[in-house]
Amino acid sequence: MPDAVAGHLTSRVGDRAGVLGLFLCQASRLPELITELIKVKPAKPIALSLVVDTGLGGVPKAVSIVESRTELLALRMVEMPAPSDVDEVWLERVAEFVPEDAVRVVEPRRGGAEWLSGVRRVAEAGYWPKLRCGGLSHEAFPSVDAIADFLAVVTEASGSFKATAGLHNAMRHTDPETGFTHHGFLNLLVATARSLHGGDVRDALKSEDSQALAAEAAALPDEAAHAVRAVFASYGSCSLAEPVADLEGLGLL
């Protein structure tokens, strides 16, 4: 926790501070975070995404803890897993527990016939579906088809989404140590742009041509770029340095 807080605060005032979003912390580790922030005394409250790992029933207590320390933390987002067949009743409970001014991010469990229906219900409720793009097993990495189907559902519902896991690098690549093929956040961004305008989404997700994708992203008019970011609104990464280095190398920052 001390390293995470120090890294975040340093990045907040660096040359690429504008790239950095929220500080993510699991609900179960809130006491650690608060203890560390009391020590470092940040100049302004840390904008927080609360990652619920204590079950839906643990949300009210976690939110209450954050809201009791407004000199240290500003709740901006609450993220939580959900069953693949998440229904309106479950989503209504989220609305009861999470303040209206916090973004609600819900991750229906991927796989099975109900997953995309769950994604659609989350988006239509005005929440952000979460797309998990990797993990510690081959099964944790969704196929190109699964991501393309996810994007189709979210764009059709005029929704926003957050991506997470496995997206440290801009481009699709295979890790030589694990053998896992990682999706790239630039692939995902261009695929989102194509999903909005009827382009070949799967081709963008499969591409390993970094120069072509960078040129396509750079050529987006301002209005189209804003539309893309309204859909692909955020993604989580445990590294700021790697994404920034990739974007600088591609001439996109």
Image: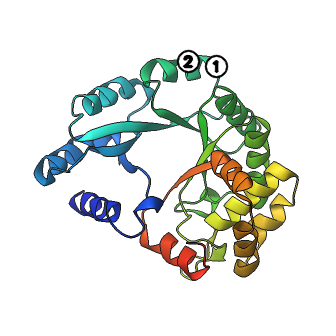
Q: Secondary structure at mark 1?
A: helix
Q: Is residue 27 left or right of residue 35?
A: right
Q: Is residue 214 left or right of residue 36?
A: right
Looking at the image, how many numbered discs can be counted on the residues? 2
The residue shown at (62%, 64%) is 185
Viewer-nearest residue: 182 or 104: 104
In percent of width and height, residue 187 lies at 70, 66
Position of residue 59 in the picture relative to residue 253 (left or right): left
Query: How many other residues sit within 10 Å of disc 1, few (<14), some (14-19) or many (≥20)?
Result: few
User: In front: 92, or 187?
Assistant: 187
Q: Quadrant of residue 7?
A: bottom left
Coordinates of residue 157 in the picture (x, y in percent): 75, 34
Using the image, tell me which numbered label, if any, was put on residue 88: 1
Q: Is residue 13 visible?
A: yes
Identify which amino acid the numbered label 1 is placed on.
Glu
**Mark 2 residue element:** helix
Q: Is residue 52 in view? A: no
Which residue is rendered at x = 64% and y = 58% of the image?
Answer: 139
Instruction: Report the disc number at residue 92.
Output: 2
In the rendered view of the protein, which quadrant contains the C terminus? bottom right
Q: Are marks 2 and 1 in contact (CB under 8 Å)?
A: yes
- 184, 109: nearer the viewer: 184
